Amino acid sequence: MPGLNQTAAQSAIDVIIAGGADIRLMTTSVNYDDTQTELDTKEVGTADYSAETVAQADWTTTADVPGENTTLENDVVIDFGQAENDWGTVVDVVIHDADTDEFIVADEPNDPEITIGEEVSIPAGAITYTLG
């Protein structure tokens, strides 16, 4: 069983989403040792963009004991609004706790290029992260 056990996985998730977590769209790949300072330079940098906060209650964690993992999933649509500028290509999505400067990073497999006029949102259930 490589990785975290159920209790440790749940604890790690809880630390980051406690009190809510910021969902940040990154146009440069995030590194393992990044901090908020580096995240700030890698995030969409236009005036019409801001990270969206998702309350702790709007996440679901599910333990799969036979599969030896715990999954975090968003329960609500995360709406960034309409892009009034080109935002660039999103390569990573970060779930960030600014208070602890801890984050979970998910590779954005589609690498969408966000351009002027697009409505930008992440559907409920589209952010999933598995620990185990």
Image (spheres, helix red, strand yellow):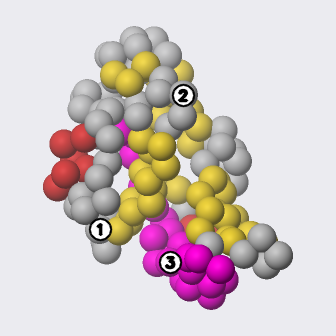
Quadrant for residue 77, please give it: top right
The total number of labels drawn is 3
Q: Is residue 16 magenta?
A: yes
Q: Is residue 129 visible?
A: yes
Q: Position of residue 20 (x, y in %)?
A: 48, 65
The quadrant of the picture occupied by the C terminus is bottom right
Q: Name the kind of residue labelled 1 in the image.
A: Asp
Q: Which residue is mark 1?
A: 101
> Of label 2 and label 1, which has the lower sequence position?
1
Q: Looking at the image, is mark 2 or mark 1 nearer the viewer?
A: 2
The disc placed on residue 110 is 2
Q: Is residue 14 magenta?
A: yes
On screen, residue 110 versus residue 99, left or right, reads: right
Which residue occupies 22% across, 47% down? Answer: 40
Who is closer to the viewer here, 112 or 48?
Answer: 112
Which residues make up the magenta segment?
Answer: 1-26
Which secondary structure, mark 2? loop
Residue 10 makes an appearance in the image: no
Please give the name of the residue rendered at 32% of the width and 48% of the height, measured from the top-left corner. Answer: 30
- The picture places residue 7, in percent across and down from the top left corner, at 62, 87
Taking the image as shown, residue 103 lies to the left or right of residue 19, namely left
Is 80 placed left or right of 123 in the picture? left
C-alpha distance separating marks 3 and 2: 27 Å
Which amino acid, by three-letter code, is at mark 2? Asn
Identify the residue under disc 3. Answer: 12
The answer to the question of whether label 3 and label 2 lie on touching residues, with beta carbons closer than 8 A, is no
Which tag, 3 or 1, sits closer to the chain's start?
A: 3
Residue located 50% across and 37% down the image: 108
Q: Give the mark nearer the N terminus: 3 vs 2.
A: 3
Circle 3: residue type: Ala
